[in-house]
Amino acid sequence: MKQVLVDSHAHLCDEAFDQDRDEVIDRAVGAGITAIMDVGYDLDSSGRAAVLAGRRQEVHAAVGISPHDAAKAPGDYLDQLAGLAKNQRVVAIGEIGLDFYYDEPRDRQREVFQDQLELADKLGLPVIIHDRDAHGEILDLLRSRRRTEYPAGVLHCFSGSLEMARECIKMGFFLSVAGPVTFHNARRLAQTVAELPLERLLVETDCPYLTPVPYRGKRNEPANVALVAARIAEIKGLPVDKVARITTENAAALFGLKQPK
Ligand code: NI
């Protein structure tokens, strides 16, 4: 049986793929990837993700304003996102969140993040969360949400503690694991992954960034999500096809994707 996988977080609309976007998607399909989430980070990339998802059946779109793009979002960005989300191929709001690593105005980040959480609740869509060096505030904001029904969303490229992961799971979130789990210095992340139930994990590339071992330094692409699944299987001592199957089911449940035959 062919392995099935979902890349739950990719930036196919990044200019790094302008020359060969369709070949990259074809290569992923050839590697058994049945669905790729193309995740927007500003209005332009969100719009392009929705268009790509309309053109390629393997691609699904998320629309949102990332913390890096919060400061330059126009005044009517929420209306524009709501308009994009009417498209059937848009299945999540993201990526949204907080990033205190870079020197972006934090008040604007908080405001744009909260407004988009509310938009997701209004539209009944899951959220894709970017959290860098902002674990405590992210948890507080997620706890303050009124929404309680599942599935709530995913913390992408999870980098928090095991304790934080457990809190997020309690709130209905999935945790997504990306290329850094393959890095040799990622011992803490490996320990966290070892403890977490496979039923709450997703796999992703975050391509073109975060290329896994052994391709570090090269452009990342969705086909490489197999390397992330293989590393999780190794950490957990499970067969890789089980990791592939369960994470695919998780992504399908979170984003409401049709299960592959
Ligand atoms: Ni991303």
Image: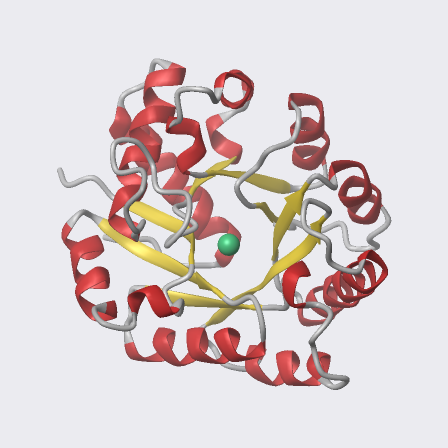
Instruction: Answer with the quarter of the image where residue 59 lies.
Output: bottom left
Above or below for 13 versus 109: below
Res 258 seen here: no
- In the image, 151 versus 74, the foreground residue is 74
- In the image, 260 versus 220, the foreground residue is 220
User: x%, y% of residue 130?
Assistant: 62, 50
Left or right placement of residue 29 versus residue 50 in this view: left
User: x%, y% of residue 217?
Assistant: 31, 42
User: x%, y% of residue 139?
Assistant: 78, 40
Left or right placement of residue 141 versus residue 13 in this view: right
Res 175 seen here: yes
- In the image, 211 versus 243, the foreground residue is 211
Residue in the picture at 73% in, 70% down: 71
Which quarter of the rendered picture does the N terminus lie within? top left
Residue in the picture at 40% in, 16% down: 236
Number of on-image labels: 0
Above or below for 156 versus 81: above
Left or right placement of residue 172 versus residue 43 in this view: right
Residue in the picture at 81% in, 58% down: 110
Left or right placement of residue 165 versus residue 240 in this view: right
Q: How is the image coloured?
A: secondary structure
Residue in the picture at 65% in, 50% down: 152
